Image (cartoon, rainbow, N blue to C red):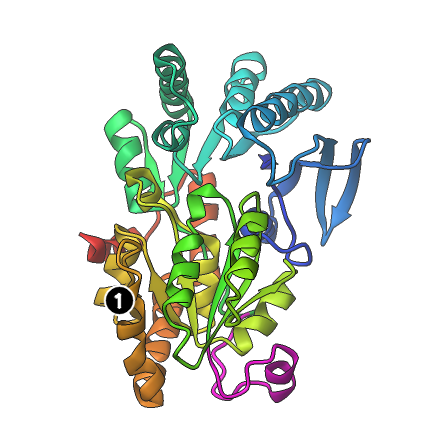
Amino acid sequence: MKILYIHQYFKTPDEGGANRSYFMSQALKAKGHEVEMLTAHNDKKAVSRSVDGLKVHYLPVPYENQYGFLKRIKAFLYFIILCKNFIKRSNDFDKIIVSSTPLTVGFIAIWAKKKFNIPYIFEVRDLWPEAPIQMGAIKNPISKFWLEKQELRFYKNAERVIALSPGMRNHIEKRAPKVKVELIPNVADCDFFERVEVKDEDLVLQYGVKDKFVVSYFGAVGPVNDLMSLIKCAELSSHLPIRFLIMGEGSSLPEIKDYVAKNKLSNIFFIPYGTKGDVRDVMNVTDACYVSFLHKPVLRTNSPNKFFDAIASGKLIITNIQGWIRGLVEKRHIGFFADSDFPAEFGEKIKPFIASPELLSKYQKASRSTAEQFFSRKELSHHFVQAIEGKNYQHEAEIRSIFSLSA
């Protein structure tokens, strides 16, 4: 098949960020499909280039994590216009994959289906418009009603819908019970990341963490990520031999840095947001990874990329998220739940792991084992390809079984 994959935030491993669409498109190519990626960049002109054998079309749609809600909506709508113009010129595709967020990519898919009779697969990475509604960004009842109506249209007109977590799958099946929904979570790249028994001494010196227990945070630093919960934990753990490393970017980062500086929190260090290789270096010196979101029901359904990088690296997982991630972490014995409302509990829960390298190693091994057994990139990429080809996944029961731990 000739497939058009539309993802506004496409990133390669060299760029950092979420690489799911890169790996899935490579898996499709490996099975003999012709794949073209349609995405956006901050340059002023459109450009097409080959990226590791994948033809990528970059459209000029400026976007920054620091954008406010209205500016983001403007970028989403402009991307729709440019994508439609592209498809008008090139529409000989057998199938389209659209990946949200933003939900607005559904407008491109449903338009292409109506105008050129191209079927589409709808990949749901986050629940829109439910997320901005619960965050208070969308308050107007008419806007809510209209957006929810469009969401339902996108699901019903899709050949299949791909959900990245059980919460997303349940939401979609409840909204559109007749739609075929595949559960394909984010992947753990167990080939790229590895569990190290001994930290690299050069990296230990580079990051200034000698003789320290290292807790790291990777990823977005915005309002929904609730990184202040980690800062509060660090503030109350200054008496423990812990170093907190933060590698992220986003609109809340300047505010958090100011708080750390004003309160002279010397156990917190900020690292520039980097490539996947940079993440692997920081993982090397890391003992535990912190996975965080605000206490909003919709955010419990998230499938954060850095959680999967962390388990692929065999790290102790500390999370403040209720829902499937907490259930998985606790029942697989790969970490612990740190309630944001009671940050003092963090210190008490982490002490046993600082005191006992054997206990830490046991949890870290279980973390890596979970990644290999249930979330390997090879297996889930195979599932993705089968979904695009319209086939039933042979091991779907295994995928559902691991998520049942969160029940």
> Is residue 226 found left or right of 356 in the rendered image?
right
Q: Quadrant of residue 336?
A: bottom left
- Is residue 402 in view? no
> Is residue 329 found left or right of 279 in the rendered image?
left
**Which quadrant, please, contains the N terminus?**
top right
The picture places residue 347, in percent across and down from the top left corner, at 31, 72
Of residues 350 and 389, the one nearer the viewer is 350
Q: Quadrant of residue 277?
A: bottom right
The picture places residue 372, in percent across and down from the top left corner, at 40, 69
- Is residue 109 in view? yes
The picture places residue 234, in percent across and down from the top left corner, at 42, 67
Residue at left offset 31%, top offset 55%: 340
Residue on which disc 1 sits: 345
Q: Is residue 73 positioned above or below 20 on the image?
A: above
The picture places residue 222, in percent across and down from the top left corner, at 50, 44
Q: Is residue 183 positioned above or below 118 on the image?
A: below
> Is residue 110 found left or right of 47 in the rendered image?
left
Q: Magenta segment, which residues?
A: 193-213
Q: Is residue 206 positioned above or below 375 on the image?
A: below
Give the crowd class for mark 1: few <14, some 14-19, many >=20 residues within 10 Å.
Answer: some
Residue 281 included in the magenta stretch of the image:
no
Q: Count every numbered label the image shows and give the total.
A: 1
Residue 210 included in the magenta stretch of the image:
yes
Residue type at tag 1: Glu
Residue at left offset 48%, top offset 63%: 309
